[in-house]
Image (tube, grey):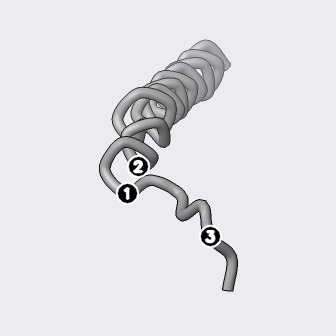
Amino acid sequence: MGLFISTVAGFFTVLMISMAMFIHYLRVGLNSHSSVVIDPKPTEKY
C-alpha cells in the first residue's frame, strides 16, 4: 500500500511541476506585448 501511495504522489508531483512549467512558458515565453511593437495595429479601417 505504501508503494501505491508513493507512486501516485510522485506522479501527481511530476504532473503538477510540468503543468506549472508549461503555464510559466505560456505567460513569459509567449509575451503578447511584443506583437504590438513589431506589427502595430493599423489606424485606418477599410
Q: Secondary structure at mark 1?
A: loop
Q: Secondary structure at mark 2?
A: helix
Q: Secondary structure at mark 3?
A: loop
4 left or right of 31? right
The mark found on residue 27 in the picture is: none
Residue at 31 percent across and 50 percent down: it is: 38
In the foreground, 44 or 25: 44
> Which sits earlier in the primary sequence, circle 3 or circle 1?
1
Label 2 vs label 3, nearer the camera? 3
Q: Quadrant of residue 29?
A: top left
Q: Position of residue 25 (x, y in %)?
A: 40, 34
Vertical relation: 22 (above or below) 3: below
Vertical relation: 38 (above or below) 11: below
| Disc 2 + disc 1, Cβ < 8 Å | yes
Q: Mark 2 belongs to which amino acid?
A: Ser
Return the residue at label 3.
44
Residue at 37 percent across and 57 percent down: it is: 39
Residue at 67 percent across and 86 percent down: it is: 46
> Which sits earlier in the primary sequence, circle 2 or circle 3?
2
| Disc 2 + disc 3, Cβ < 8 Å | no
Return the residue at label 1.
39
Residue at 67 percent across and 19 percent down: it is: 1
Return the residue at label 2.
35
Q: Position of residue 43 (x, y in %)?
A: 60, 61
Residue that lies at the very extreme toward the bottom in this rendered image: 46
Q: Position of residue 24 (x, y in %)?
A: 46, 26
Q: Mark 1 belongs to which amino acid?
A: Asp
Q: Mark 3 belongs to which amino acid?
A: Glu
